[in-house]
Image (cartoon, rainbow, N blue to C red):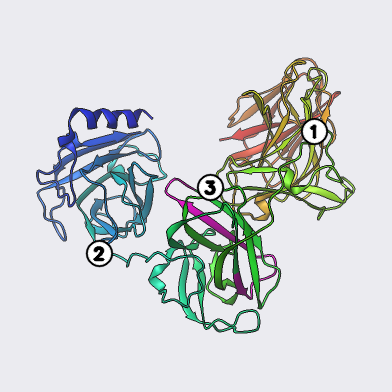
Amino acid sequence: MKHFYALLILLIVNLGFSQSLPINFEGDVTTADFVDFDGGTATVTSNPNPSGINTSSSVAQIVRDGGAVFAGSKILLTNNLDFSVLTKLSMKVYTTAPVGTTVKFKLEGSGPAVDVNATTTVSGAWETLEWIFVGTANNLNELVFMFDFGNLGDGSATSTFYFDDVEQIVGPTPPVPMSLPIDFEAGQVDTDFLNYNGAIASIIPNPQMDSNNMSNTVAQVVRSGGEYFAGSKVFLDNTIDLSTLWQISMKVYTTAPVGTRIKLELENASGTTNLDYLTTVSGAWETATWNFDGKANDYDRIQFLFDFGNVGDGTTTSTFLFDDIKQETGPPIPEPTATTLPIDFENSVVTTDFTDFFGAIASVIPNPQIDVNNPSATVGQFVRSGGAGFMRSKLALTSFIANMSAFGSISMKVYTDAPVGTLLKFKLESNVEAFGKEQDVLTTVSGEWATYTWDLSNGDNPIYNVLTLMLGYNGPNDASANATFLFDDIAQVATTLSNGHTQAFNIDYINIYPNPANDYVTISSKTEIIKSITLFDMLGNQVKMLHTNALEVTMDVTDLSNGIYIAKVSTALGLGSLKLVIE
């Protein structure tokens, strides 16, 4: 935020510092025109290697030394960039950093920021790097340079970068906006799609014409390499009005397995909303639907993310046909109904009672993992599908939770295939006042049900009436098995150290130090004799076990690899878990 205010002051004091493209650093830009941030220092200096493609006398230099992994510097332009014709930015770069170093070019301004990465292909020589910004709105006028993005600079030669000749050049043809409904029979062409991260869209003759789709022409997306979120986007010439026709339908054909995830994302200049559809057939056309009831009416782009969560391989199962995209009347989504504790999902809660945020998808489903630890027929499911690391889902309660001094903990059964040590965040909130309290636990098993307990006691004030689940917090959001969590039997329980598989991570009478450790670690108890300590790695493997009978135990960890471990501590009150980092 402080960098924003610094830039604002710069604008107010002297608008003459703003620049225009192209920039060659031969007098058009000086050191004073740069705004540095988070460990990046930019200057205009002499060309350290006037040879090859760049014999200029003056260039810009950025040295990254400490700060943050996104350290860099920025330049303000006089006017907003217009990518309607020239859709690419290019820049000459020189560094002795290793080949493959990431150079992020970010554009900021009055609209949402946009960034694109390029990677170096040489070391110790000048090269020209390019960044494609096709489809970017024309409300951005700040160039942000972030070299070696993702790593912390150390001020050395490999954290020093020179750049020159920043200019806007011809790139891919800008997409022509479309209008709903879209049937691909009205002259749309391949370049009307904007492709991302391994997805390639095109318009082709219908190769699978049948009674479900007699169209002559359809769109095709082939996913090959890239990222699990590879997709293709179309622009609309008007915003989508979802006030009466809030459902979007589309015909889809693929030979990918039944249950393949298709994410449809609506975008505008300020944000996105998305929903998932799971295919129900393979090798036949079907009509997929996405119900956007209650969403905004200002979206003007549609992005198609087929087989979201997996990296495509270019085969037939990574190939998708689609057609006839249109708005239609859909069923209204019921308002969430408040419920009461305990919650077992056998009759009192349905999928629409959840309110999802930032990419979480919560639902009530038949229990796919019935075992002795949870024989329930029905459970909740939390899928992290796109969105933010802090995605969440909420359940409202009919009344405020009482007796939080004696029964101030919440217990819940959880099943996930995510690695041991995955973060489960549970929060109590109020929908009346701005009250909230959250606690974390780490999973201690993978591939089986376990009961975890969060100590959320706050005295007897009845101020909480919303349950907020943030499972797998800051973990994968690719809708994979590692990003999927089953949960059941949410209950208010006594505030004590839990037993069995029950895990109370915040054990206030047990300490572990030093943490991080590198040779020895001590676990001490203020009041209860420690009976045993069992150490597990992140895969759930037992790596150490000590049988003890003392208030304080010292453990040798010199033979263990660096990483995160879970120490399960047994006392007369039960079994608790502590996180240990070994460096």
Task: Give percent across and percent down for residue 573.
Answer: 85, 24
Residue 170 is marked as 2
Over which residues does the magenta segment extend? Answer: 251-271
**For marks 1 and 2 on the same chain, the one whose residue lies earlier in the sequence:** 2
Q: Quadrant of residue 557?
A: top right
Position of residue 393 relative to residue 514, above or below, is: below
**Residue at image coords 32%, 28%:** 5
Task: Give percent across and percent down for residue 566.
Answer: 70, 36
- Asked if residue 476 can be seen in this view, the reply is yes
Report the front residue among 397 and 64.
Answer: 397
**Residue at image coords 80%, 21%:** 402
Which amino acid does the dot numbered 2 rest on?
Val
Going by the image, does 529 lie left or right of 211? right
Which amino acid does the dot numbered 1 rest on?
Ser
Report the front residue among 10 and 554.
Answer: 10
Specify the farthest residue to the front. 244
Give the residue pinned by disc 3. 296
Going by the image, does 467 lie left or right of 210? right
Going by the image, does 366 lie left or right of 15? right
Q: Quadrant of the N terminus?
A: top left
| Mark 1 surroundings: few (<14), some (14-19) or many (≥20) residues within 10 A | many
From the image, give the main secondary structure of the stretch colored magenta: strand
